[in-house]
């Protein structure tokens, strides 16, 4: 279960970096839009990471 959590977290990190890079390239002329997107995206990423950590902690306790 721990390997699945680590693998999903790593995959999510790479996909988040790719999405951030794609947005920065697409909106390279608007620094304000990039800043707001980065703030919102990082908050969303941290919330989903916390949810997944909580979910896997609960599921791993039920499996034992």
Image: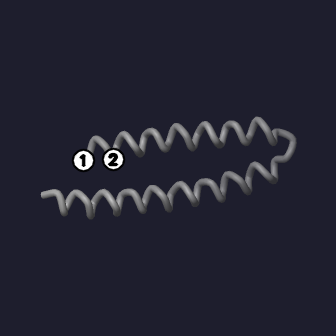
Judge whether 50 appears above or below 8 on screen: below
Q: Return the residue at label 1.
A: 1
- What residue appears at the point 36 percent right and 39 percent down from the top-left corner? 7
- Quadrant of the rendered structure where residue 60 is? bottom left
Decide: few, some or many residues near mark 2? Use Cα within 10 Å; few <14, some 14-19, many ≥20: some
Q: Is residue 21 left or right of residue 56?
A: right
- What residue appears at the point 67 percent right and 37 percent down from the top-left corner? 21
Judge whether 27 appears above or below 62 on screen: above
- Quadrant of the rendered structure where residue 9 is? top left
Which residue is the extreme one toward the right?
29
Q: Return the residue at label 2.
A: 5
Q: Is residue 35 left or right of residue 41?
A: right
Decide: few, some or many residues near mark 1? Use Cα within 10 Å; few <14, some 14-19, many ≥20: few
Q: Are marks 2 and 1 in contact (CB under 8 Å)?
A: yes
Is 55 or 42 nearer to us in this picture? 55
> Spatial distance from mark 2 to mark 1, Cα to Cα?
6 Å
């Amino acid at each position: 279960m721990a390997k699945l959590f680590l693998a999903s977290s790593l995959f999510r990190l790479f996909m988040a970096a790719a999405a951030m890079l794609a947005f920065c390239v697409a909106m390279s002329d608007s620094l304000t839009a990039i800043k707001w997107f980065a703030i919102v995206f990082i908050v969303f990423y941290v919330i989903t990471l916390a949810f997944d950590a909580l979910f896997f902690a609960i599921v791993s306790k039920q499996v034992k």
